[in-house]
Image (spheres, coloured by chain):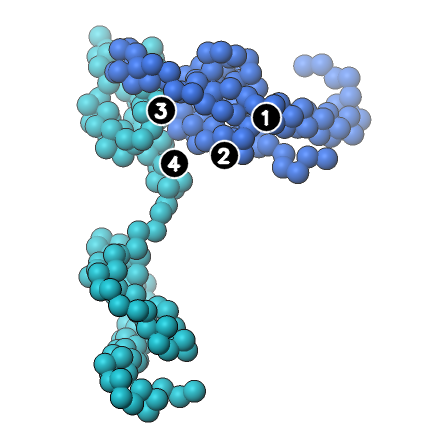
Amino acid sequence: MPRDLLTDFELMILLATLRAADDAYGVTIAREIERTGGRTVVLGAVYAALDRLERNRMVTSDVGDPTPERGGRAKRFFRVTPEGIRAVKDMQRALVALWTGIPELKGTRT
Amino acid sequence: MKNVQPPRLAVALLNRFLPDNEPLVGDLLEEFAVRKSRVWLWRQVVLALLMDAFRNRVEVRPLKLVDRPPLEVKRPDIRPWTRTVNLTGSPLPGVGGLSLVILVTLMTIVSPQLWCLVLGLALVLMRRHTGLRRLDGDSGSPLHLVGP
């Protein structure tokens, strides 16, 4: 059993970071969540969650080169660590276990 | 036709209050260039500043200007808060300036009778503080003023 489960937003961020692969920075992560999750994302909240995940060693970050379209500001690229992947899998297991415990949702398709 | 330039005030606020978060500022400007919505940018800026303010609540303590041993080293029975050097001009540590004005106004509106309690407390503290200062300055007979 995992010691700490992720919040739904942290889980979405980790999954979006994994989907964005090598191009995972604030904008791409936020776009991925907006596209798949259907919710508006505040970039400040994305960075707050990413900082928290980095403190918990679930992601690492590297600063890229400054680009002119960003006003000469650098991108900060994120990568999910093995601990982060483990946390995602733990979360998936926990959610699936909860899901299968609800008979009326079993096998339903929307 | 929409103006594609981000609002200068928003950018200035970001540079002023989020100087260490260059990637976030860059992301906001990059996304603004795509969305071209000032409302979207302002919403993002305000929320980013609010989140940063709540995330980085750091207590700034006033500098200790006088190099002398703390009072509790001499007298361990004296509470540490009696030796705090308050440089804010406020009687309450951590509350100063506008916050103090708001606090006083709210207290006067909500419960004016609380002022009696505050004044009484202030008198007691002043008396105690005066006693401690006398104790601190009088190295000859400190035990006369404070019990065991």
Badge 1 and badge 3 both on one subunit: no
Look at chain B in the picture and name its colour. Answer: cyan
Q: CA distance from mark 3 to mark 4?
A: 12 Å
Frontmost of labels 4 and 2 is 2
| Element on which disc 2 rests | helix
Disc 4 vs disc 2: Cβ atoms closer than 8 Å?
Answer: no
| Element on which disc 3 rests | helix
Q: Tell me which residue sits at (25%, 60%) in the image.
A: B64
Q: Is residue B33 visible?
A: no
Mark 2 Cα-neighbour bin, 10 Å: few <14, some 14–19, many ≥20: few
> What residue did someone put label 4 on?
B51
Which of the two residues, A32 or B55, is positioned nearer the viewer here? B55
Residue B148 vertical position relative to residue A7 in the rendered view, above or below: below
**Which amino acid lies under the numbered mark 3 shown in the image of this protein?**
Leu
User: Which chain is indicated by disc 4?
Assistant: B
> What residue did someone put label 3 on?
B24
Q: Earlier in the sequence, mark 2 or mark 1?
A: 2
Q: x and y percent of residue A48 in the render?
A: 44, 32
Mark 4 Cα-neighbour bin, 10 Å: few <14, some 14–19, many ≥20: some
> What residue did someone put label 1 on?
A84
Mark 3 Cα-neighbour bin, 10 Å: few <14, some 14–19, many ≥20: many
Frontmost of labels 3 and 4 is 3
Look at chain A in the picture and name its colour. Answer: blue
Q: CA distance from mark 1 to mark 4?
A: 24 Å
Q: Quadrant of residue B53?
A: top left
Frontmost of labels 1 and 4 is 1
Image mark for residue A55: 2
| Element on which disc 1 rests | helix
**Which amino acid lies under the numbered mark 1 shown in the image of this protein?**
Gly
Disc 1 vs disc 3: Cβ atoms closer than 8 Å?
Answer: no
Q: x and y percent of residue A83 in the render?
A: 61, 27
Frontmost of labels 1 and 3 is 1
